[in-house]
Image: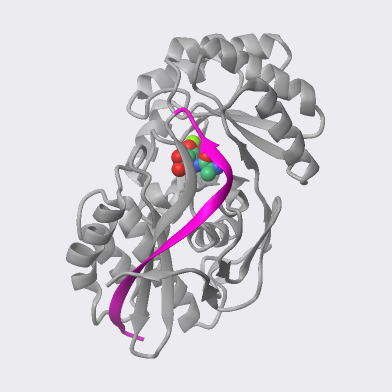
Amino acid sequence: MKITDIKFAMLRVPLKTPFKTALRTVEKVEDVIVIVETDTGHVGYGEAPATAVITGDTHGSIIEAIKTMIKPKLIGEDIEDLNRITHLIQGSIVKNYSAKAAVEIAVYDLFAQRYNTPLYKILGGGEPTISTDITISVDYIDKMVKDSIDAVNRGFETLKIKVGKDIGVDIERVKAIYAAVEGKALLRLDANQGWTAKEAVYALTKLEDAGVRLELVEQPVKGYDLEGMKYITERVHTPVMADESTFGPKEVIDLIKMRAADIINIKLMKTGGISNAIRIADIAETFDVQCMIGCMLETSISVAAAAHLAVAKSHVITKVDLDGPSLCAFDPVVGNVKFNGAEISIENTPGLGIKEIKGLEMLG
Ligand SMILES: C[C@H](N)C(=O)N[C@@H](CCC(=O)O)C(=O)O
Ligand SMILES: [Mg+2]
């Protein structure tokens, strides 16, 4: 099964409600879809969002990196040589992680199709059902409380509360949500780099002293501020998770050695795809550190790939933030991963099992 072509399309899906973080407000998913064709007629699909504020990637940079740097290296390569192909992808250009991720996802899809088995089985197998949290966008306190209660009523048992704005209001936001859903849902916070280290310690200590129990706090300070992450990790009881602070395996090793966080958020769009995500999970397992699998604003193509990985690495990927498809107004993809509220389940068809993507706009 040899790679003959790589084509591009756009997939646009409105969100149910605007997605608001400390970094940005978004109303629709607009992702680049990568279609890898082979001489046997098998097709692999990948996806990349343009999360410029986190990864630096734009639609233009994703398409250009693949067209001019990655694709020329892959034409004629045999899908059976998976490690050689992922090595070629990773070595084709520095950074550009979302572009690399989209191509790797399509290649892994094809590799699993080649062996006629679902991707998670090729990655090591596991119980094909996992449970995701749902994001509560940062907003007025009453709105966040209402959104949290609605999410609990829809069956979500873990809420990822976006904070990272005004520290005083953030404390009130979390207290109000906790009071509304206590005993019904676990709360994890994501400040998306919005606090300083001192603010984070102040806010988390206040919340801890008020009896608010949090599962974790994600990326309280700027991604580059590892000293700040360490400062917080040493001073609060709430476990600290690194998101924007870690992209690839080397950064994860450095962060773990520094003891700058307790948990790592693995996202395919930060690692450059599945091969480095596996490496990070293995490093974390070696150091006895737990991981979350996360996503950007992505549909059920790339989030499906992340779900397959989470199933296969569930002994170390113990937390799941794969709510991209649940945030979308509809699911345009018919594949083998089913997103049903908090439950994500995988059917027994080859690869990612993608049969149809509604509304694909092919690019020339
Ligand atoms: C969608 C997911 N729950 C999430 O919050 N992902 C990111 C932000 C993604 C974005 O801004 O597109 C995160 O910070 O964890
Ligand atoms: Mg985050």
Q: Where residue 333 sits: x, y (%)? A: 55, 68
Quarter containing the C terminus: bottom left
Q: Is residue 268 left or right of residue 241?
A: left
Q: Determine whether 327 is above or below 188 in the image.
A: below
Q: Is residue 244 magenta?
A: no
Where is residue 220 shown, x and y percent of the image? 47, 24
**331 is higher (above) or lower (below) than 203:** below
Residue shown at 46% from the left, 72% from the top: 109
Please name whichever residue, 327 or 48, is drawn nearer the observer in this view of the structure: 327
- Give the overall secondary structure of the magenta segment: strand
Nearer to us in this view, 306 or 237: 306
**Residue at coordinates 27% horizontally, 79% vertically from top-left?**
77
The stretch in magenta equals 1-22
Image position of 188 with respect to 12: above or below: above
In the visual, does 351 lie left or right of 45? right
Looking at the rendered image, the quarter that the N terminus falls into is bottom left
